[in-house]
């Protein structure tokens, strides 16, 4: 049996790895010939301003008094240059956005393993093609282009990484640092002949990365006073830098300017997905080689931005984010980045028709070069008879074969099973399908003898099914933070704990004192979690940062949550309740709103599920049908008591998969980066640390899974079914879902469409492997017990 399990795991690992080999290897190719426009360029130098996390609407709209929020940029739009919206692609993160702007291609998906920071493969960029480039800003962004550049012509000036603190009192200093250093740089260059000579050469770029707006957006939301004031500070800084450069170069008219952003931000302060607020970024360009503003009578766009921004009479020229790279290359006369897929926006250029034609031709040849190299590599790596289009010979044949069999009584069960699997599949796309499934679950007692056999338990089942069904209809976590709901969830946990403590005091057991102390410690942990959440929230609102005492308590509570359950008795409900309370203490610290109630309601339903499954067993099925209150997780079930599988066991396995899906999508779409809210980890740390923050959020995700799997352990114990048999049914259901998503994988369309289809398959395939881990975790939490020194052995009475 062990051999088959190992073999099955290996097969699943191979299928899991195959998707990464097919889709998550770098699509970039090398060996192309550099292409550049053979005519003199309009500009000698270019200045690129990237305001990290700046939304287009927040820059272009008028403030509450009807005045421009960014008067300098507004003046550029009306009198000096061209403007529009730069449309980004997912993932709307800093690295992919900057790669699209400077290298001209949408992020290599293999960069996800590097946290969107390091270069997973070498790629060409505008900076690599310049004669000299000077950069100022965040170390995360500057480093990846400095490392990827050949030679020593890139000079990066960055502040310390610890300055990127979401809880800092004033993060606009991240931008003022850049502006001050740039002004000092040009002032010092007047007394440095070597530097002065370099600055007066052609084909040079100045790159200013401005992180303050993004940091303020995460910490305070884009509608906050801090975010909007940061935009004004950036606007004033742009004015000063432009003035400095004009003065340094004697206003020679050979400088081109581009102001844009790497991504936008949602109203709740996150980014990563494809909402228009995340993908619509500002694009303003002026100076050498750029057309002056064009007044128009009417413009046709699918949105209403022009009217909202009072810019309907100024020609709007939108671009795709990757188009900015070839535009910059054409302006200063350097080769187009070799891996660029951007299209040159010629309507923005203020040049001769010949220069436009030559630039467009260069752009087309540069993209064609990539296709030729890619095709050659593909043919070399593939056997000739395998280099053919894929034909779809398989699902239709299977259906035809099934139709040849005569109908029988199992057809109804088969259709019901297929319907259930389809609901699970659809829940990946529409969260409300989980609500529909839970409502259907609520009707289960009415079609079985349960309604007459255990009416009170059935009523509890119906109530908690309907209550849990509300969560998938709620907005995704993080959009509307509400600390009072988090505190309310803590109070409910305390109320339940008081009820349990009361029942413990009524028992005449020799270990009541130990059990009581454990319950009181867990209640204290819950109270501390509530206080830390409330105190941290108020401290951050006052811009006082994360208090050290709150941070220390948070980490202590997190560490103790692994130990506390193992000290509790092994009686089924005692152990499960201890796991719940310990988990809730940590979950409260990681919550920002209604999701704090989710594991509590889910656990209540799990408790009722255990009772319901016990009631479904007829007395004749097992030798001794025990009371749930007397069952221990260490109960040594004799192998002779294991029974054969029945149809109810398939239902139990399906319930488990459905509850796991509910834990997965109940409060958001975990397949999307956009579901993560950095505010969830502010009780533990506020300084940006992607791996630590990611680990904390993954633990938050894991808690509902662990609660469901622990309940499933109890179900297996109370129904006296072999865990291996029931677990194999669960794996088969997961495999059927994985097969479904395998045929839904796309290798065409947008990055979002392709990435979503792959992520769904990976999630389901991972679930099969993940269930093995969860099963081991649940067994450890339910069956292991820490023995304190001097404690007498416990005997079952």
Image (spheres, rainbow, N blue to C red):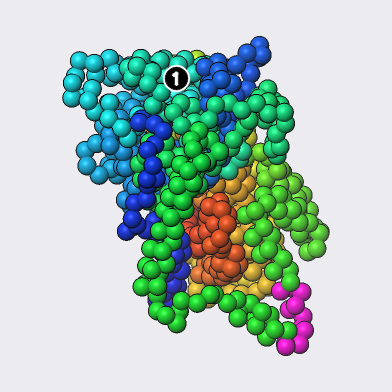
Which residues make up the magenta segment?
Answer: 404-414
Residue 59 magenta-drawn?
A: no
Q: Nearer the viewer, residue 612 or 554?
A: 554
Q: Where does the N terminus fall, quadrant-wise?
A: bottom left
- Write the residue at 24% across / 19% down: 189
Tell me the crowding category of disc 1: few under 14, some 14 to 19, or many 20 or more residues within 10 angstroms, Cα based: some
Image location (x, y in percent) of residue 744: 60, 64
| Quarter occupied by residue 223 | top right
Image location (x, y in percent) of residue 619: 68, 69
Q: How many marks?
A: 1
Image location (x, y in percent) of residue 164: 38, 27
User: Residue placed farthest to the top in the image?
Assistant: 65
- Write the residue at 27% across / 26% down: 199
Q: Is residue 746 left or right of residue 418?
A: left
Q: Is residue 418 left or right of residue 155?
A: right
| Quarter occupied by residue 740 | bottom right
In the displayed structure, 494 sits above or below 793; it is above
Q: Nearer the viewer, residue 580 or 455?
A: 580
Regarding residue 492, the answer to whether it shows in the image is yes
Regarding residue 699, the answer to whether it shows in the image is no
Q: Is residue 578 left or right of residue 183?
A: right
Q: Secondary structure at mark 1?
A: helix
Q: Nearer the viewer, residue 446 or 479?
A: 479
Image location (x, y in percent) of residue 468: 68, 45
Residue indicated by mark 1: 238
- Write the residue at 39% across / 26% down: 255
Residue 405 magenta-drawn?
A: yes
């Amino acid at each position: 049996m062990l051999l088959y399990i190992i073999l099955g795991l290996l097969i699943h690992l191979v299928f899991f790895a195959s998707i990464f080999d097919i889709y998550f290897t770098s699509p970039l190719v090398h060996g192309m010939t550099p292409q550049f426009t053979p005519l003199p360029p309009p500009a000698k130098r270019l200045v690129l301003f990237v305001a990290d996390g700046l939304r287009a609407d927040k820059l272009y709209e008028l403030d509450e008094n009807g005045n421009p929020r960014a008067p300098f940029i507004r003046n550029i739009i009306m009198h000096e240059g061209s403007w529009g919206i730069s449309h980004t692609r997912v993932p709307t993160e800093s690295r992919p956005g900057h790669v699209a702007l400077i290298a001209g291609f949408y992020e290599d998906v293999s960069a996800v393993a590097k946290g969107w920071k390091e270069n997973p493969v070498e790629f060409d960029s505008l900076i690599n093609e310049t004669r000299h480039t000077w950069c100022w800003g965040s170390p995360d962004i500057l480093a990846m282009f400095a490392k990827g550049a050949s030679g020593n012509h890139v000079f990066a000036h960055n502040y310390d990484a610890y300055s990127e603190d979401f809880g800092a009192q004033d993060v606009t200093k991240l931008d003022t640092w850049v502006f001050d250093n740039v002004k000092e740089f040009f002032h010092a260059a007047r007394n440095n002949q070597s530097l002065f000579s370099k600055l007066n050469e052609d084909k040079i770029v100045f790159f200013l990365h401005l992180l303050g707006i993004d940091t303020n957006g995460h910490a305070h939301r884009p509608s906050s006073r801090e975010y909007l004031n940061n935009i004004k500070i950036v606007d004033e800084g742009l004015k000063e830098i432009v003035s400095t450069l004009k003065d340094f170069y004697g206003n020679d008219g050979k400088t081109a300017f581009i102001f844009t952003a790497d991504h936008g931000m949602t109203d709740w302060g996150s980014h990563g997905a494809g909402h228009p607020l995340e993908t619509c970024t500002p694009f303003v360009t002026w100076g050498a080689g750029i057309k002056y503003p064009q007044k128009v009578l009417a413009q046709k766009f699918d949105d209403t931005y022009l009217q909202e921004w009072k810019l309907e009479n100024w020609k709007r020229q939108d671009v795709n984010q990757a188009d900015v790279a070839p535009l910059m290359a054409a302006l200063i006369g350097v080769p187009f980045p070799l891996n660029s897929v951007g299209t040159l926006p010629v309507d923005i250029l203020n040049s001769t028709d010949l220069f436009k034609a030559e630039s467009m031709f260069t752009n087309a040849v540069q993209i064609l070069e990539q296709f030729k190299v890619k095709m050659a590599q593909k043919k070399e790596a593939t056997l000739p008879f395998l280099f053919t289009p894929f034909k779809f010979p398989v699902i239709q044949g299977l259906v035809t074969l099934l139709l040849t069999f005569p109908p029988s009584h199992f057809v109804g069960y088969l259709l019901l099973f297929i319907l259930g699997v389809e609901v699970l599949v659809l829940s990946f796309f529409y969260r409300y399908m989980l609500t529909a499934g839970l409502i259907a679950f609520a009707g289960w007692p009415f079609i079985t003898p349960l309604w007459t056999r255990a009416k009170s338990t059935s009523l509890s089942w119906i109530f908690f099914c309907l209550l849990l069904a509300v969560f998938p209809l709620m907005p995704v976590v993080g959009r509307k933070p509400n600390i009072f709901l988090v505190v309310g969830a803590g109070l409910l946990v305390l109320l339940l704990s008081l009820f349990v403590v009361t029942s413990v005091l009524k028992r005449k057991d020799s270990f009541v004192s130990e059990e009581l102390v454990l319950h009181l410690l867990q209640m204290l942990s819950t109270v501390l979690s509530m206080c830390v959440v409330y105190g941290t929230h108020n401290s951050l609102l006052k811009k006082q940062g994360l208090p050290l005492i709150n941070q220390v308590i948070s980490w202590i509570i997190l560490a103790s949550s692994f130990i506390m359950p193992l000290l509790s008795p092994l009686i089924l409900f005692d152990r499960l309740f201890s796991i719940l309370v310990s988990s809730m203490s940590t979950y409260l610290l990681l919550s920002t709103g209604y999701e704090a109630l989710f594991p509590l309601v889910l656990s209540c339903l799990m408790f009722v599920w255990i009772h319901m499954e016990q009631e479904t067993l007829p007395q004749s099925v097992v030798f001794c049908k025990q009371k749930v209150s007397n069952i221990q997780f260490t109960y040594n079930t004799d192998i002779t008591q294991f029974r054969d599988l029945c149809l109810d066991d398939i239902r139990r396995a399906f319930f488990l998969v459905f509850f796991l899906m509910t834990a997965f999508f109940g409060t958001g779409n975990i397949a999307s980066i956009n579901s993560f809210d950095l505010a969830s980890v502010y009780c533990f740390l506020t300084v940006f640390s992607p791996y630590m923050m990611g680990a904390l959020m993954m633990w938050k995700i894991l808690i509902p899974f662990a609660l469901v799997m622990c309940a499933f352990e109890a179900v297996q114990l109370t129904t006296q079914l072999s865990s291996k048999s029931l677990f194999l049914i669960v794996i088969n259901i997961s495999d059927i879902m994985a097969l479904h998503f395998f045929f839904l994988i796309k290798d065409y369309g947008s990055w979002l469409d392709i990435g979503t289809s792959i992520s769904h398959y990976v999630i389901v395939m991972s679930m099969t492997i993940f269930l093995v881990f969860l099963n081991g975790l649940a067994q450890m939490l339910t069956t292991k017990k820490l023995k304190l020194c001097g404690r007498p052995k416990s005997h079952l009475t």
